Amino acid sequence: MGSLSTLLRQCAAMVALTVVLAWAAPYEAKLWVVGTGAVLLAAFLAVSLYRHHQIRRLAEEIDEVLHDGRRVDFSNCREGDVAVLTNELGKMVARLARTGDTLAQERNALADALADVSHQIRTPLTAIGLMLPLIERTDDGRERRRLVRELEGMLDQVSWLVTTLLKIAKVDAGAMHVERRDVRAGEVARRAVGPLATAMDLRDVNLVMDVDEAATFAGDAPWSAEALENIVKNCMEHTPAGGTVTVTVREDALATTLMVSDTGPGIAAEDLPHIFERFYRGRDEGARGVEDSGAQGVLVAVDIDGAQSEELAAVADGAAETAVRQPAGFGIGLSLAQALISAQGGTLRAANNPEGGARFEIAFPKLVV
């Protein structure tokens, strides 16, 4: 109604102007002035009514969008300011639709991640709860000490899991401070394998370092070392006794590369596309991608969602020892490594060596195109 009232006022003004001009014009020109004014008024009315129709149609489409119609129509693209406005609004609606879809996907992913985190943390906590009554009833000192060491391993497991999840959350939120400075790749490699030397000796796994001491890259040394440590540990855990884990550092004109390879069974073909996915544990229990946790210890094999009463009964009968097994990993070590490398502008890829075993390659490019 407001636009129609404005149109009527404009028409009235044009009629008044035509009357004034006709009154002031000479007698022989009065008819010409009135005719010209009528033609101009008719043209103005036609254009204004057409624009009013376009704007009303555009308003209806916007109202449809606001009521979840999400209708985007580019078939009426013509020249003119209203058409330009229509196209821009169509682009805005399309962008908002994509943003809404992305937010819905992220919300679903967050819900799935929270469920996974809850399950992963609840598993060792349930194991701890089952171990405590067993420790309380054990009279043998050596057996009590053994169970206490296992309990400490479970607590270390929970601590490592929570710390790792917090780091991944910081990377996802963009809240992790990553420095960009020249780093010696050889020093990063030695810093990464240092904490694993004892574990490799216990597992009888050989470590081979093939390092170009002149190799450097622009990144963050502590985070790079932690990412590389997770990868080396993953390879160590999948290498049989007497096997070898090799860390190679090279630099060329395009990138600095840190490569870790092992002589283990390699990565299953169906697991390879998902090896860096968070909480991915492998489709095969014996598959390569199932162990990449960073904690040692034991878990009590219980059905967290339904069989706790049976396990508690087993504890009461003194038979909980049969439910103790080694952990199969959480599936977040490699995910954390990829997040840390990506935050520095690098890339992390996984593959199988032609001669057998897995290979992980970290690349820090020299030039960004």
Image (spheres, grey):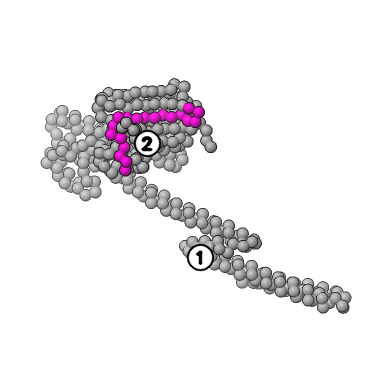
Label 1, residues with CA under 10 Å away: few <14, some 14-19, many ≥20:
some
Label 2, residues with CA under 10 Å away: few <14, some 14-19, many ≥20:
some
Q: Which residue is under mark 1?
A: 64
Q: Which residue is under mark 2?
A: 350
Q: Which corner quadrant holds the N terminus?
A: bottom right
Q: Position of residue 51 (x, y in %)?
A: 64, 67
Numbered-mark total: 2
**Dot 1 amino acid type:** Glu
Image quadrant where residue 25 sits: bottom right
Can residue 244 be seen here?
Answer: yes
Does 265 appear in magenta?
A: yes
Q: Position of residue 280 (x, y in %)?
A: 32, 42
Above or below: residue 259 compared with residue 122: above
Residue visible at 44% across and 32% down?
363
Q: Which residues are magenta?
A: 252-270
Image-based side of 250 in relation to 354, left or right: right
The furthest residue to the left:
317
Residue visible at 18% across and 39% down?
323
Q: Nearer the viewer, residue 187 or 300?
A: 187
- As helix, strand or loop, the secondary structure at mark 2 comes to strand
**Dot 2 amino acid type:** Ala
Does 246 appear in magenta?
A: no
- As helix, strand or loop, the secondary structure at mark 1 comes to helix
The furthest residue to the front:
354
Residue visible at 21% across and 49% down?
306
Q: Earlier in the sequence, mark 1 or mark 2?
A: 1
Image-based side of 64 in relation to 160, left or right: right
Image-based side of 63 in relation to 233, left or right: right
Residue visible at 19% across and 29% down?
145
Q: Position of residue 336 (x, y in %)?
A: 38, 37
